[in-house]
Image (cartoon, rainbow, N blue to C red):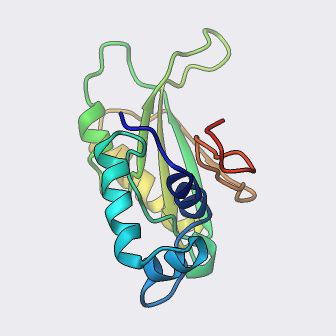
Amino acid sequence: MKILDRIDYMLIKELERGLPSEEEPFNAVGRKIGISGEEVIFRIKNLKDEGAIRKISARINQRKIGIMANALVAWSVPPDWDGYDELASHAGVSHCYLRKSVPDKWNYTVYTVHHRFSREEVHEEVKKIAESIPVRDYVVMFSSEELKRVPAVRIDENGDGLR
């Protein structure tokens, strides 16, 4: 992997803040760090090719568009159950996790995440999913607040290195 220069670090730091909501966001990012929008795109491609970044993806502020019901559903499935792919493939499931149970305390081993405009919509969706799979023991848990999500890799304050 090539050694990243100061502009690369500055670019990564700007990308961590998020792209501005405007017609030419890469030009805006470039202006902040003193390069053109074309060079921003070129450097992003190079950083991706070099493995310094994996991807750039949108992070939507769900509450601003009216999605107020975010739920984690814990499913208690039989040990020999093999319907994970079917469960994960439902359109309303954004994430699906398999975890170990805590015997005699918490017997739920599969978790799905759902985002809808209302709690009623989530309950309807989960009920339909439960009817389509042979699992009836589940718990729907709604989030009470949205916590700030931060990138896993951060640039230090001087832009000199990863921490």
Would residue 151 be found to the left or right of residue 43 on screen?
A: right
Q: What residue lies at 65% left-to-right and 44% top-to-bottom?
A: 160
In the visual, does 110 lie left or right of 87? Answer: right
Instruction: Judge left or right: residue 44 versus residue 133.
Output: right
> Furthest residue to the top?
103
Q: Position of residue 27 (x, y in %)?
A: 45, 82
Q: Which corner quadrant holds the C terminus?
A: top right
Q: Is residue 118 above or below residue 13?
A: below
Q: How many marks?
A: 0
Eyeballing the image, is 1 above or below 89? above
Q: Could you tell me residue 125's position as x and y percent?
A: 41, 59
Q: Residue at x 68, y 53 (%)?
A: 143
> Residue 68: where, in percent of width, then height?
62, 70
Q: Which residue is nearer to you in this view: 98 or 49?
A: 49
Instruction: Tell me which corner region of the image, top left, top right, bottom left or bottom right, holds residue 144.
Output: bottom right
Q: Residue at left 32%, top 41%?
A: 50
Nearer to me, 26 or 98: 26
In the rendered view, tell whether residue 82 sits above or below residue 86. Answer: above
Give the residue drawn at x 38%, y 38%: 2
- Give the quadrant of the N terminus: top left
In the rendered structure, the answer to whether residue 41 lies left or right of residue 25 reads: left
Q: Position of residue 91 (x, y in %)?
A: 30, 58
Tell which of 12 and 153 is nearer to you.
12
